[in-house]
Amino acid sequence: QVQLVESGGGLVQAGGSLRLSCAASGRTFSNYFMGWFRQAPGKEREFVAVIRWSSGITYFGDSVKGRFTISRDNAKNTMYLQMNSLKPEDTGVYYCAAYTKSGAYIYTRSSEYAYWGQGTQVTVSS
């Protein structure tokens, strides 16, 4: 069974940086896509970024392009989200998620992701 555990959230001032981690276990993830979503109070869950584990190909949501990067460490089975130039609107609970499907299509809808972590809070103060 796939398990995803996020860490690294916290409180940061606007313009600052944070790095989130997602430790994955339970499977070999070479055929998986792993991503990050976030959810602010009263808002829908929003796609942030995704990485194809095998190739490292990445894709980002428009609101974070140029500020966030996503990466993975195969040896540690861990995915990272480096968040720079943070803004108050980046505040929310950040979730690690994963899916596996045949082909190379990248999904940004949360309904396509079968596995989820418990989330980690990120708060950006102005």
Image (cartoon, helix red, strand yellow):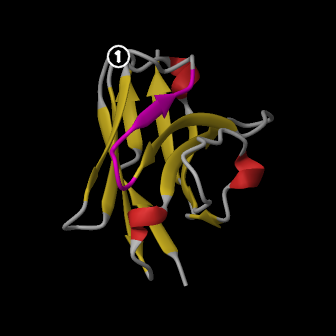
Looking at the picture, which amino acid does disc 1 mark?
Ser
The majority secondary structure of the magenta stretch comes to loop
Across and down, in percent, residue 74 comes to 24, 62
Identify the residue at horizontal 66%, vertical 38% (top origin): 108
Across and down, in percent, residue 18 comes to 31, 36
Is residue 56 located in the magenta-colored stretch of the structure? yes
Across and down, in percent, residue 34 comes to 49, 53
Identify the residue at horizontal 40%, vertical 47% (top origin): 9
What range of the chain is rendered magenta? Answer: 53-61
- Image: 40 above or below 94: above
- Image: 68 above or below 101: above
Q: Quadrant of residue 67?
A: top left
Q: Is residue 27 left or right of residue 92?
A: left
Identify the residue at horizontal 45%, vertical 18% (top origin): 65
Q: Is residue 126 left or right of residue 109?
A: left
Identify the residue at horizontal 55%, vertical 31% (top origin): 91
Q: Is residue 100 left or right of residue 66?
A: right
- Image: 86 above or below 19: above
Residue tagged 1: 85
Question: Outermost residue toward the front?
Answer: 103
Of residues 124 and 33, the one nearer the viewer is: 33
Of residues 123 and 25, the one nearer the viewer is: 25
Is residue 88 located in the magenta-colored stretch of the structure? no
Question: Outermost residue toward the left?
Answer: 75
Task: Kindly state the secondary structure of the residue where label 1 is placed.
Answer: loop
Of residues 29 and 102, the one nearer the viewer is: 102
